[in-house]
DNA sequence: CTGAAAGCGCTTACAG
DNA sequence: CTGAAAGCGCTTACAG
């Protein structure tokens, strides 16, 4: 049919002509205004269909000073934790009639800045951001100054006032560590993670559990590394070379644990039998890793949905109080520990 | 500073006033037009900075009939293969000055239709689509009729004329199967995958390798299932119950292979020792699974970058010939097979 | 090299 | 319930 090449686009004016009404009437029909009688509305819709009319949101949003796009910024899609979060965020946002402007920063603050600016220029109605490591704390104030609703995800950005959705990291790791202690382990490692608030919070939970049972915190059993599969593989190997050899470890996250599982396997050891291992996140893959991973469930997809809901709430009610949503960690015991 | 609440936005008119030039001059400066002498340009930029001006792309794009957004539609971010592709696509697009409108369909054609419509209304400059199962073949023509450049990714959509980026599935699986045969296996299973062109292509490669060595294709050793970890787990279990028991299997993809690894481990078996297993994709995780997975490398991230490049090319040169990019599969041998 | 003017496609009061 | 008019913030010929 009508290929709208570089020819004039079909606009509400054309629809108006075809349906023999005014252009305001068409506009009203398009937003389902109750002012228009059903039969007129039907006639207009029919005409629109027939001449192949497509609504131009850019024009509408420019005039109406509204926006149906929301910026979502993540930095490590390669980690299924973030991929699952993104799925949750996107789903909720699309359900609410928005469309997501997505950007991936790979922990690069400059890239994040650029993308933030583009989203601002694009007139996004709001922002969901999992800040890259090294993001200045002032960012929340800046974005507020732009008049853009923002919810920070997963990694807090200092003590300021802003909406946040994340997990109770301290309690989660505390529970995982405690589980290991109760199973009789006394030399327990902590592997993976190199920097950032999330690591601090998790380490705090780790130390708290140790302290509670009067177990010494052995600096030697804390092996930092990138929070990746490779990081987990390397730190697990390092840990196994410590003497006396630890018998268990809690991992910074599931991905690190998967790497650790690989290292264990390489030595002919099996988590759950020769070594106890706990993950964190409960990414979908954890249920069927080799062996299935015991971990701390923070329901990533749900977390994403919550972040989206908080943003949607603030867009609707700009004045409402700041929200902080922390998912309650739940221990899920499978075979690794 | 200047919170642009619901107050009037600062526009190029304000910048013009502040810099004491006309508004067209400001517009020209913003697009780095050589028409404007450097010192004037600098004055304008300075004024813009000072009064907190932010470019309004919606207005610019409406007037100029251009667009800096590109729609990217995927359906299973939970599979790292697609997540890695998305990373590649996004990176390339952002580098070229675009921003991605992203949508996740979970294999739901209706959802895909809705999102497609929204992207059209938003005036996306182009589309990168990995079509959900069940997408009608007519879609490529429809989108062409809208005047939107489109590149289809991973799953072909019939024999029509459209840009495509994917992998040579047949050759890839052929190579994997042949590797198993050369290692002496004669009873080889094929697990995972339930429907779609990609499965057909991969099965074709599987059969070809078998036929070439005069091995019979045993219907019993083909176990279809969702292309997921769970699917892999279940099909591996089913396969191990066949008699005589097969000694090797090629998997629909890496994720299926990971599930199979889990099933094997549960029975105290280890891939590479008690059973040979080949994956497909070479997702990052494959390098450090337990044990590391032998697989067919189709470089997902690169594939995404290529898809983006093809689209960018078509946007620039609408008349150019259709492109079909197929990544050359490379066998990567690790421990599982 | 810079300014005045028209217009992208819509929405929103305001009359009638 | 419907029409005429102004305007969202920009770009693009066109004069000068």
Image (cartoon, coloured by chain):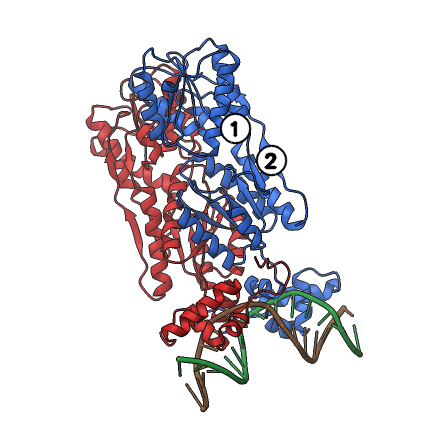
Chain colours: A blue, B red, C green, D brown
Asked if A245 appears above or below A148 in the picture, the reply is above
Asked if the residue at tag 1 contacts the one at tag 2, i.e. Cβ–Cβ closer than 8 Å, the answer is no
Which residue appears farthest toward the top when viewing the image?
A184
- Residue A104 picture location, percent across and down: 42, 46
Which residue is nearer to you in this view: B287 or B40?
B40
> Where residue A195 sits in the image (x, y, percent)?
41, 33
Chain letter for mark 2: A
The subunit letter for the residue under badge 1 reads: A
Q: Which residue is mark 1?
A: A169
Report how many numbered discs are placed on residues in the image. 2
Residue B212 lies, in percent from the top left, at 21, 34
Q: Quadrant of residue B290?
A: top left
Residue drawn at (53%, 56%), measured in percent from left and top? B117
Tag 1, which secondary structure? helix
Which residue is denoted by mark 2 in the rendering? A325
Which element is circle 2 on?
strand
- Is residue A195 something that shows in the picture? yes
């Amino acid at each position: 049919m009508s290929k709208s090449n570089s020819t004039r686009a079909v606009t509400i004016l054309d629809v108006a002509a075809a349906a023999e009404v005014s252009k305001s009437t068409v506009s009203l029909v398009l937003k389902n205004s109750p002012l228009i009688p059903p039969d007129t509305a039907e006639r207009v819709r029919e005409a629109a269909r027939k001449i192949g009319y497509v609504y131009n949101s850019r024009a509408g949003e420019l005039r109406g000073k509204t926006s149906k796009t929301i910026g979502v910024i993540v930095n490590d899609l390669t980690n299924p934790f973030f991929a699952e979060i993104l799925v949750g965020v996107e789903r909720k946002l699309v359900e609410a009639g928005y469309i997501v402007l997505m950007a991936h920063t790979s922990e690069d603050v400059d890239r994040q800045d650029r993308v933030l600016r583009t989203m601002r220029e694009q007139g996004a109605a709001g922002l969901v951001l999992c800040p890259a490591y090294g993001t200045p704390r002032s960012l929340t104030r800046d974005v507020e100054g732009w008049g853009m609703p923002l919810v920070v995800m997963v990694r807090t950005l200092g003590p300021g006032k802003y909406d946040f959705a994340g997990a109770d990291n301290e309690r989660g790791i505390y529970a995982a560590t405690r589980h290991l202690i109760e199973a009789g382990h006394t030399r327990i490692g902590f592997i993976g993670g190199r920097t950032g608030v999330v690591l601090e919070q998790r380490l705090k939970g780790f130390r708290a559990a140790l302290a509670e049972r009067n177990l010494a915190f052995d600096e030697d059993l804390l092996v930092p590394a990138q929070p990746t599969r490779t990081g987990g593989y390397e730190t697990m190997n390092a840990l196994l070379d410590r003497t006396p050899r630890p018998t268990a470890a809690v991992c910074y996250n599931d991905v690190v644990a998967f790497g650790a599982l690989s290292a264990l396997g390489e030595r002919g050891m099996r988590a759950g039998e020769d070594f106890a291992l706990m993950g964190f996140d409960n990414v979908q893959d954890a249920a069927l890793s080799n062996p299935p991973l015991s971990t701390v469930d923070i329901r990533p997809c749900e977390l994403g949905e919550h972040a989206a809901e908080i943003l949607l709430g603030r867009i609707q009610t700009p004045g409402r109080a700041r929200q902080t949503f922390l998912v309650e960690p739940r221990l899920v015991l499978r075979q690794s520990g």
